[in-house]
Image (tube, rainbow, N blue to C red):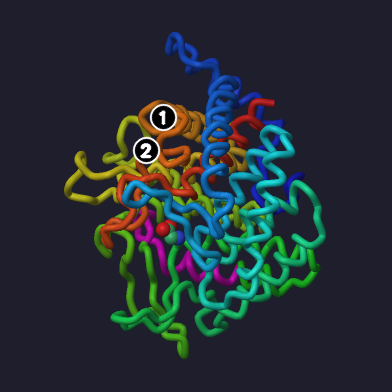
Amino acid sequence: MRHAQPAFFAVPRASMLLGGLLFAAGVSAAAAEESTSNLVKRSLASAEKQYTGMLAAVQSTPGFPRTVENGQVKIVEVKDWTAGFFPGSLWYLYEATGNKKWRAAAEDYTARMAPAKFDKTHHDLGFMLGASYGNGYRLTKNPAYRDAMLAGATTLVTRFNPKVSSIQSWELWKNTNWAFPVIIDNMMNLELLSWATQASKEPRYREIAIAHADTTLKNHFRPDNSSYHLVDYDPQSGAVRGKQTVQGNADASSWARGQAWGLYGYTMMYRETKKPEYLEQAHKIAAFFMNHPRLPADKVPYWDFDDAAIPNAPRDSSAAAIVSSALLELAQFSDKQLAQRYRGFAEAQLRSLSSPEYLATAGENGGFLLKHATGHKPAGKEIDVPLNYADYYFLEALLRLKASQK
Ligand code: GLY
């Protein structure tokens, strides 16, 4: 059965009300805890304030706000993998409030994404076009947005190699000996392909998404269900050449955001295909993350579960936001007991992210919502900073939490 919502960023069904209420009853024992609906309302109101300031500061500049660097908002070009998240967050604010001001801003920033649909140089078109055009199409049904996404999906499949049965993630960067690198993050780009088959009735896009998810399932995971960041393949034979990290602490370590992408990716691919092995993998990744002995009490992970500096390692609020959104969806595909656990965990993460420790007060944090995210620690970049994708998945998770209360 397909979701009532279109493929992009479906929110939970109201039928999950009972689990949410049971959880709410459980946590209400913790004395004066803020109600779930107030938590969502307060955080969305705070997001509106922050992004009003952000828009006023950046809208006349070409490009997209990504993070804060040297005290300044860093603006990136359309070719940056994160470009679509700011437009996506604007669409979420429009969805949350119905305020036309957010729609106009989202339309402006979505239009700026246009060149991405023909960019054959990387795999991130699913992130870039899904967050911007995908949400725009879901909320407005503008046919031009549909055309842009189909063009982007057609571009993305040019990176598929049938021998490897995967989409190539990155180009062959200097100073690497890669032949066909595939990263766990790539799971997130498959939603665009599944949507494209639904929209065009052309099966090839979804077939490629399934082939990629199957190959990743086979080669990226370790016996404890954590994942390698990058698997390199021989493009001629499809054989695995190596497994390593680029953004994590070590090849064998568990980079927190990588685990989050895997969890979200297999949950989404189960929604799209109903293949039981994807659901099983999503449950396994959830268990790895939720039960990890080095997950802090506030459930916002260190940037890598295996950094020897823990407990003095930086956190990654983006990983927490992605996981909370993924768990709220996974709860829909789970028995009552697990659903309650997933929802409870996600809500606890969102409570942490909505606390002053993580949620910026109006005017600080360069106008971004969440503090304490980590982009690329091994490169010494974006450590303990705001990131546009942390904000995007935070807003998505808040909307999913809100929908689960109905
Ligand atoms: N997809 C790149 C990252 O998660 O940093």
Q: Is residue 211 magenta?
A: yes
Q: Residue at x 38, y 68 (%)?
A: 230
Q: Position of residue 147 (x, y in %)?
A: 77, 66
Q: Compare residues 117 and 150 and report the one nearer the observer.
A: 117
Taking the view exactly as shown, the residue that stands out farthest to the bottom is 236
Q: Residue at x 34, y 49 (%)?
A: 374
Would residue 136 be found to the left or right of residue 168 on screen?
A: right
* CB under 8 Å between discs 2 and 1: yes
Which numbered disc flags the more N-terminal residue, 2 or 1? 2
Distance between the Cα atoms at labels 2 and 1?
Answer: 7 Å
Q: Amino acid at mark 1?
A: Ser
Taking the view exactly as shown, the residue that stands out farthest to the front is 60
Question: SS at mark 1?
Answer: helix
Asked if one can make out residue 235 in the rendered structure from this viewpoint, the answer is yes
Q: Compare residues 71 and 80 and report the one nearer the observer.
A: 71
Q: Which mark is residue 300?
A: 2
Would residue 49 be found to the left or right of residue 141 on screen?
A: left
Q: Compare residues 399 and 97 and report the one nearer the observer.
A: 97
Q: Which mark is residue 352?
A: 1
Q: Is residue 60 magenta?
A: no
Question: SS at mark 2?
Answer: loop
Q: Which residues are magenta?
A: 210-227
Above or below — where is 125 with respect to 340? below
Above or below — where is 290 with respect to 82? above
Above or below — where is 95 with respect to 1? above
